[in-house]
Image (spheres, rainbow, N blue to C red):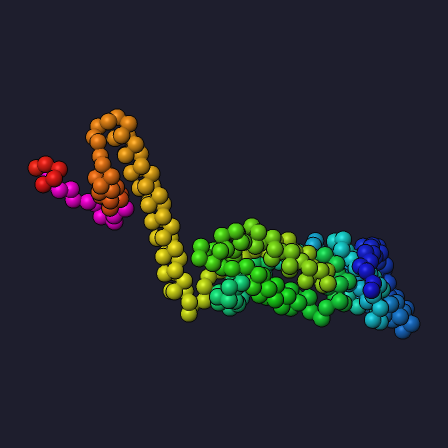
Amino acid sequence: MKEEKIIVPANGYLMLFVFLVLFIGGIAAVVAYKNPWFVLSIATALFIALGFIMVQPNNSRVLLLFGKYVGSIKKNGFYWTNPFYTKKKISLRASNFDSERLKVNDKLGNPVMISTILVWRVQNTYKAAFDVDNYENFVRVQTDAAVRKLASMYPYDNFADEGLAEDITLRSSVNEVSEALEKEIDERLSIAGIEVLEARIGYLAYAQEIANAMLKRQQATAIVAARHKIVEGAVSMVEMALEELSKKQIVDLDEERKAAMVSNLMVILCGDKDASPIVNAGTLNH
């Protein structure tokens, strides 16, 4: 397979001077001498004019001679090339691509809506022009394919009951997922001479049919986690209270009264509402 060949054509300003001499001189000679042979000078000048080419910054021209690749011009400027060359313009500027929102299944089989934002540019003009049919359409199709593959590799989110606490997820592991996506797209687009500058998730959400159920599940998971912390803290506080009472010998509690005290404290500390204390005006036994 051929590789990209960078060329620098002839100076365009020099050939512009030759064009003006032949064109203006030919017209003047025809008028002055009435000789039709001077028309050849005008025709030659017009033929030379077909070879002028202007390359703007961050643009390129791929040159072909009767179907044969001649080279690529990447340096901006005003040039003159063989008039028989076919010139194909390829932009070297960075381009943004915001993919459509795709409905795919994550690692757990849950349907999610996902899209990606891709920043890319052409690095190899030969591959972009000849190794793929349409490099811009190639970028779109391969990006969608890479996003579908990426979504199937990771779960949308972690759930404690599924043992995924250590896994990378689409929602929380933004940097890891972006790196994996960029690597996957870069490998796919290298055949077209495309350089991936940045790739990241632009939109991510559960599909509409399961969005409400998953929201309730996330809320339930959060409530369970909060309750776990509350109970853990309550047990620690009850333990500290019993130790301090025993250490300072404020009151001597038997096992039955300790159990009652623990029960009351746990109810107070773990309850959703503030407790309403009842003051016992009699003895502890009445």
Q: Give residue 85's quadrant in the image.
A: bottom right
The answer to whether residue 135 of the structure is visible from this angle is: yes
Q: Is residue 205 left or right of residue 78?
A: left
The answer to whether residue 16 of the structure is visible from this angle is: no
Which residue ends up furthest to the top in the rendered image? 248
Q: Is residue 136 left or right of residue 102?
A: right
State the quadrant of the N terminus.
bottom right
Rendered location of residue 261, percent (x, y): 22, 40
Rendered location of residue 108, percent (x, y): 51, 64
State the quadrant of the C terminus.
top left
Front-most of residues 226 and 137: 226
Front-most of residues 4 and 156: 156
Residue 277 shown in magenta: yes
Q: Going 78% across and 57% down the picture, which residue do you hit? A: 73
Examine the residues drawn in magenta and state their main secondary structure: loop
The magenta segment is 270-281
Q: Going 24% across and 42% down the picture, which residue do you hit? A: 259
Rendered location of residue 110, percent (x, y): 48, 66
Q: Going 42% across and 70% down the picture, which residue do you hit? A: 209
Q: Give residue 215's quadrant in the image.
A: bottom left
Q: Is residue 131 left or right of residue 279?
A: right
Front-most of residues 286 and 271: 286
Rendered location of residue 233, percent (x, y): 34, 41
Q: Give residue 153's quadrant in the image.
A: bottom right
Residue 13 shown in magenta: no
